[in-house]
Amino acid sequence: MNPVDDNEGTPVSVKIRERIKAARKRFNANDNIADFIEPGELELLLDEVEGKMKGVLSSLVIDTDHDHNTDDTARRVAKMYLKEVFQGRYVQAPPITEFPNAEHLNELMIVGPITVRSACSHHFCPIMGKIWIGVLPNEHTNVIGLSKYARLAEWVMGRPQIQEEAVVQLADLIQQKTQPDGLAIVMEASHFCMGWRGVKDVDSKMINSVMRGSFLKDANLRREFLSLIPQKG
């Protein structure tokens, strides 16, 4: 057994980190680390984050002992990060039932707009946006329910993200699950790190896309997909 696991006084975050390092895996902000979290450890991690957040509030010179508005803020923030906005880091991918393409469907299918919420990994400010997914199946493609695209998107976006990387991660995941002839994803989002701080431009949005397979090779298919997406903005 790893000696780190024998040390009862070792913070659970250290135990998880050591497992990841031993496996030579990444643990960047937008990586999923669920494989390295043992049963019961997420609750211990929540307690640990709460303690660290109390230190942050203290360093911000906020009197949490007497301010009724912030006396439980550390716990609320810890719970928000681990079980809500960043949950996609700490839990396994949602179960997805895949069905064979029995009818040999091969026409363009578009899912969206899917509302997504994330946070910029630079400032932890919210990212709020929509995603459109285009799929060109073939006879070997696995078919998944429409709601499952939204669940996969929520799982990927539920981590500190950079929009450009998030769309690629989602494309890789859907490609792996369905194996289509073509896959296209467009994301449009507002970044609060621009509207809340910095230039304070509340109207700016970022739009980016990923095109795979037939969408990359066939300009007509790409134009068809883009023309069928409802007017953004």
Image (cartoon, helix red, strand yellow):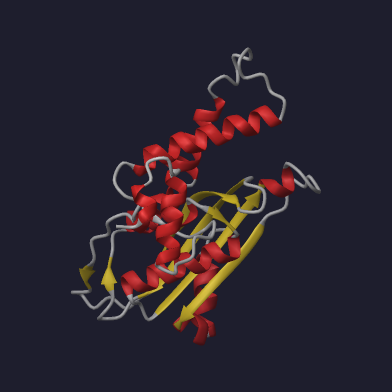
Q: In this orientation, does residue 149 appear?
A: yes
- Residue 122 located left or right of residue 211: right
Q: Of residues 46 and 131, which is closer to you in this image?
A: 46
Q: What residue lies at 66% left-to-right and 53% top-to-bottom?
A: 122
Q: Residue 210: x percent and y percent?
A: 53, 72
Q: Residue 87: x percent and y percent?
A: 43, 47
- Residue 108 located left or right of residue 27: left
Q: Of residues 165 and 90, which is closer to you in this image?
A: 90
Q: Of residues 73 and 174, which is closer to you in this image?
A: 73
The N terminus, quarter of image: bottom left
Q: What residue lies at 67% left-to-right and 19% top-to-bottom?
A: 63
**Which quarter of the figure has residue 175?**
bottom left
Q: Is residue 86 above or below residue 169?
A: above
Q: In this orientation, does residue 233 appear?
A: no
- Residue 100 located left or right of residue 123: left
Q: What residue lies at 60% left-to-right and 59% top-to-bottom?
A: 162
